[in-house]
Image (cartoon, rainbow, N blue to C red):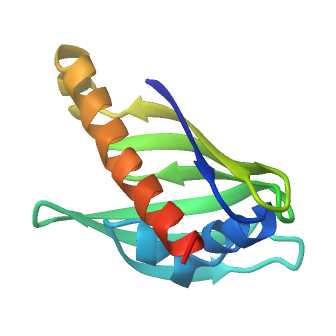
């Protein structure tokens, strides 16, 4: 499953990126993230590994992640792995001093048995993920524009 979403934010790209780059700040706009633990940190960020605890509808999911690409104040990419899926995610910012385009791309590969459900309910699952992401993007926009 491939997903893409972007939004315009009225502030500089470096300010938006600070909300993506910092795990503590990211938890403020990524609703399901309850806890983030850095397992191995590298000075250049690429190769940094972490563990996140996600909670949605009372259910907890542990995700292990690695930063696979990092361009300061421009782009951060992750490989995320959990018991239900593997996700390649890329967040990027571009723009001017007063207007930023924040974009996200996800490639989700569902694991069995979730892969069966994803096959049957593809449109619904995709719609739910996009709606949650739009809500999170709105919160990020609000936080950046304060």
Residue 116 or residue 132, whichever sits in front = 132
Where does the image place residue 89, in percent across and percent down from the top left? 59, 44
Q: Residue furthest left?
A: 58
5 vs 9, left or right, is: left
Residue depicted at x 42% and y 56%: 138
Quadrant position of residue 29: bottom left
The quadrant the N terminus occupies is top left
71 vs 47, left or right, is: right
Q: Is residue 40 above or below residue 72?
A: below
Where does the image place residue 30, in percent across and percent down from the top left? 41, 65
Q: Is residue 5 above or below residue 122?
A: below
The quadrant the C terminus occupies is bottom right
Residue 3 or residue 11, whichever sits in front = 11
Quadrant position of residue 98: bottom right
Where does the image place residue 82, in percent across and percent down from the top left? 39, 53
Residue depicted at x 83% and y 64%: 73
Quadrant position of residue 45: bottom right
41 vs 123, left or right, is: right
Where does the image place residue 32, in percent across and percent down from the top left? 31, 65
Residue depicted at x 25% and y 37%: 128
Residue depicted at x 47% and y 42%: 86
100 vs 79, left or right, is: right
Number of disc labels: 0
């Amino acid at each position: 499953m491939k997903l893409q979403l972007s939004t315009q934010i009225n502030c500089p790209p470096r300010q938006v990126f600070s909300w993506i780059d910092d795990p503590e700040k990211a938890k403020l706009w990524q609703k399901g993230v309850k806890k983030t633990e850095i397992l191995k940190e590298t000075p250049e960020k690429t190769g940094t590994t972490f563990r996140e605890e996600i909670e949605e509808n009372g259910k907890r999911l542990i995700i292990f992640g690695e930063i696979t690409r990092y361009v300061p104040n421009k782009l951060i990419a992750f490989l995320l792995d959990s018991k239900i899926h593997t996700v390649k995610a890329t967040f990027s910012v571009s723009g001017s001093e007063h207007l930023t385009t924040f974009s996200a791309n996800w490639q989700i590969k569902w694991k069995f048995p979730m892969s069966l459900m994803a096959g049957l309910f593809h449109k619904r699952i995709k719609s739910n993920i996009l709606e949650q992401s739009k809500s999170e993007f709105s919160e990020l926009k609000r936080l950046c524009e304060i």
